[in-house]
Image (tube, grey):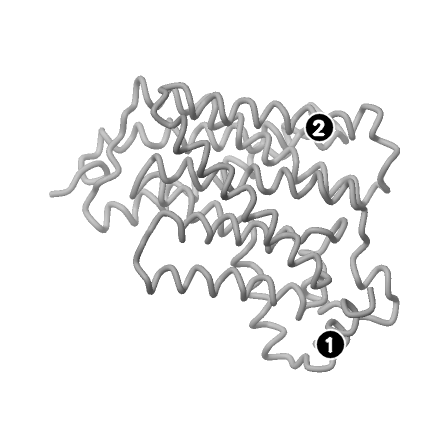
Amino acid sequence: MGINMDILYTLEKLRVPFFNYFFLGISYLGAEIMSAIVVFSVYWCISKRDGYYIFANILFGSGLNQIIKTICHVPRPFVAHKDFTIVEKARSTAEGLSFPSGHTQNSTSLYGSLFALYKKKAFRIFCAVMIGLVGFSRLYLGAHYPTDVLGGFINGLIILAAVSLLFRRFESSPNFIWILFGVGGIALLAAGLIFEIGPGKTILEPEEMGSMLKGMYMCSGVSLGIALGEPIERKYVRFETDAVWWGQILKAAAGLLLILVLALALKYPAQAVFKELKVAYVPRFFVPVVFGICVWPAVFGRLGFLSRRK
């Protein structure tokens, strides 16, 4: 890993406090919380179809990322090289294995989806810049090798191409969305169980296993939540995305807050049921996503300013 570490050692020498905080903030723009804010805002306020498209890219990209990490089993640079340091405040964002970069993959899936969906040149430049900045931030902070960032970018592009093809060919089918997310969610759940309680449980160290299982089960819970919520919304709710501008802000802000509260409230009941098993992440994300897909949107029709323009 000669050139990998040469680049990282060079960046390590260039670190100063201002850029440490700057690139830490940039890194969070490629994290799961930013994805949740964007995708639910698009789903509630702009286009249900676009929301599902972004969901698919993020979830399946993240799921594949976890599988590749497990197969390649590459330790983080600050773990493999004791004389190399990570920016300490970034340590919590650098758990588990290294290749490919999850933040880079996630930013490629998120901003790449937005790039594909919306055609304004300035917006597309912004999306491309964000992908590049998030990837570079992982190098500057010392969380990943350059090859990790490249791998995350390629992974995101592959999933983006595959999801775009699936949507073009099958989205006219009324059952396409729930089947797509249902199959994906079950596959991710099965893969997680193989590693947690099946023959794969001896492959990774506990710390590495915990990070991988958390990501896989989160994606599974979200996917299964969409698979259940989409047909309910399509048949019984049928909400409108249009609203007055302040109604759009209100339904996005309130909805995201309610989803966060639900996810936090489910933490201890899920742990009580599943004990130490990481599969507890599945219901913790399944329930809030069902709420976001079909329960919260049902409120829009009852409050006119949340469902149509005036």
Closer to the chain start, of discs 1 and 2, is 1
User: Where does residue 120 sit, x and y in percent of width and height?
Assistant: 30, 58
Instruction: Farthest residue to the left: give it.
Output: 310
Q: Is residue 251 left or right of residue 79?
A: left
Q: Secondary structure at mark 1?
A: helix
- Tell me what residue is drawn at x 79 percent, y 45 percent: 72
Q: In which quadrant will I find the C terminus?
A: top left
User: Where does residue 158 sit, x and y in percent of width and height?
Assistant: 56, 44
Vertical comparison of 149 with 278: above or below: below
Q: Which residue is at the front of the view, 75 or 158?
A: 158
User: Where does residue 131 sit, x and y in percent of width and height?
Assistant: 52, 60
Q: Secondary structure at mark 2?
A: helix
Residue 203 found in image quarter? top right
User: Where does residue 137 sit, x and y in percent of width and height?
Assistant: 61, 66
Q: Which residue is at the front of the view, 20 or 58?
A: 58
Q: In which quadrant will I find the N terminus?
A: bottom right
- Tell me what residue is drawn at x 27 percent, y 46 percent: 248
Write down the residue under mark 2. Answer: 191
Q: Is residue 24 left or right of residue 299?
A: right
Q: Which residue is at the front of the view, 183 or 79?
A: 183
Write down the residue under mark 1. Answer: 12
Vertical comparison of 63 with 111: above or below: above
Amino acid on which disc 2 is placed: Ala
- Badge 1: residue crowd in 10 Å (few <14, some 14–19, many ≥20): some
Task: State how far apart marks 1 and 2 are (Cα).
Answer: 37 Å
Amino acid on which disc 1 is placed: Glu
